[in-house]
Amino acid sequence: MPVLLRPSGRIAIQAGRFRHRVTLQSRTTGRDSTGGIVDTWTDYLTGVPAVIEPASGREYFIAKQIASTMDTSITIRWRPGIVETMRVLHGADVYDINSVLPDSDSGRETLSLICTKRGAEGFRS
C-alpha cells in the first residue's frame, strides 16, 4: 500500500480506509416510574466514518464455562469529547470503549478506540 505524504512531510489520512459507519453513544442516568435508577444510551455522533480492525482475542475458563473476548481497534478522525464511558455501535455489534488513544504525530488527526465487543446477553464479555 503506497504511503501518501502531505506537503509538510506527514502521512495523509486515506479516506478509503474509513469505509465503516458507526454511531457513538453516551450513557445517561435517569429514574424510572418507581424511582429506580435506569441507564439509557443516547446518540452522541451518528454516521461517523471508521476503520474497524480486530486487535486480539482470547479464551478463558470462568464459572465452569469457556468464554471468549475480542478486542477491537476502531479508528475515527479526531473529535472532541470522546471518552471511555461511551460505546460504539456498528450494525448489530456493540463495542464498549476501554481506552481512547490520539495519534502519535499531532494528537489531533485520528483517535484509536480500543474496544471490547459485548456478548449476546448485553454484558461485557
Image (cartoon, rainbow, N blue to C red):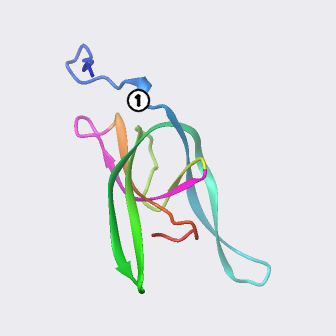
- Residue 1, how many percent across, how many down? 27, 22
Question: Which quarter of the figure has residue 58?
Answer: bottom left
Q: Is residue 32 left or right of residue 15?
A: right
Q: Which span of residues is magenta-colored?
A: 92-107
The residue drawn where x is 47% and y is 69% is 124
Residue designated by label 1: 17
Looking at the image, is 59 positioned above or below residue 103? Answer: below
Image quadrant in which the C terminus is located: bottom left
- Above or below for 108 versus 60: above
Q: Residue furthest right?
A: 33
Spot occupied by residue 97 in the image (x, y as percentages of width and height): 43, 58
Q: Position of residue 89 (x, y in %)?
A: 56, 51
Q: Magenta span: helix, strand or loop, mainly?
A: strand
Q: Is residue 39 above or below residue 100?
A: below
Please tell me whether residue 23 belongs to the stretch shown in magenta. Answer: no
Q: SS of the residue at dot 1? A: helix
The residue depicted at 58 percent of the width and 70 percent of the height is 121
- Residue at left offset 24%, top offset 17%: 5
